Amino acid sequence: MLAVLPAGLVPLAWGFTAAVAAGTVGERPLTIGLGVMAVLFAVFAAQSAMAEGALADWRLVILGGLVVNGVALVDLLVLSDGRFVPIAAYGWMLLPVPALVRTGRAVGASTRYLAFGGLSVLGAAVVGVAAVTGGVAGMGADQLTLAGLVFVAAGQTGSILDAVTRNDGGLNA
């Protein structure tokens, strides 16, 4: 069960992130969501299978994610201003990229996983452009941010779906 759970959690997390960015989810659900994610990350990081091969890289991604989630949670619970919450979002856009490259090598699908990682980087760049410029090419910052999140979600969801359907032990290579 734990091996396939991320196939649902990854798109759910990016959908939730998009809802936060669109303003349809407020601070309290965001705080709860980050707390739930932290618990799930701890469970995944504690799995012995996460100590070998490409999964060891994913353990590092999860541990990095715990740090950025922790920063966001402290911000929401203590500082109460949300200024550090974007660190968690950018962290999750970019932390997986090196592990995607390693996974692609481990399973013999380097080009595919490079594309997945590229979508994540492209999405982070689009979100960054939205934040810096307030929008470009006739798109406002909100639209551009959502477009960037779609790129990130597509890359990371594609990679986890590939990994779960592959599940041939190649990730431990």
Image: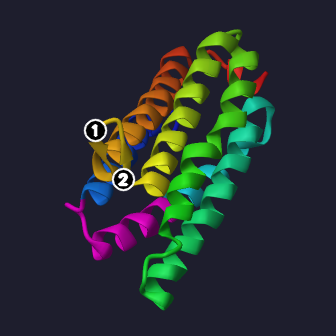
When asked about the image quadrant of residue 163, the answer is: top right
User: Percent from the top left, x then y, of residue 162?
Assistant: 51, 19
Q: Is residue 63 above or below residue 100?
A: below
User: Residue farthest to the bottom?
Assistant: 78
Image depth: mark 2 or mark 1 in front = 1
Residues in magenta? 23-39
Q: Which mark is residue 156?
A: none
**Is residue 36 one of those drawn in magenta?**
yes
Where disc 2 sits, the SS reads helix
Residue hosting label 1? 138
Check disc 1 and report its element: helix, strand or loop: loop
Q: Quadrant of residue 98?
A: top right
Q: Is residue 145 found left or right of 129 in the rendered image?
A: left
Q: Is residue 129 left or right of residue 62?
A: left
Pinpoint residue 1: horizontal percent, then vertical percent. 45, 37
Q: Is residue 119 magenta?
A: no
Give, as a three-letter code, the residue at label 2.
Answer: Thr
Residue 143 screen position, x and y as percent: 28, 44
Main SS, magenta residues? helix
Q: Is residue 82 left or right of residue 71?
A: left
Question: Mark 2 sits on what residue?
Answer: 17
In what quadrant of the picture does the C terminus appear? top right
Please give the name of the residue rendered at 55% of the width and 15% of the height, measured from the top-left corner. 166
Residue 4 appears in the rendering: no
The correct choice, above or below, for 102 with respect to 5 in the image is above
Residue located at (67% from left, 47% from top)? 61
Q: Residue at x 47, y 59 (%)?
A: 37
Q: Position of residue 90 (x, y in %)?
A: 55, 53
Q: Are marks 2 and 1 in contact (CB under 8 Å)?
A: no
Foreground pick, 118 / 30 = 118
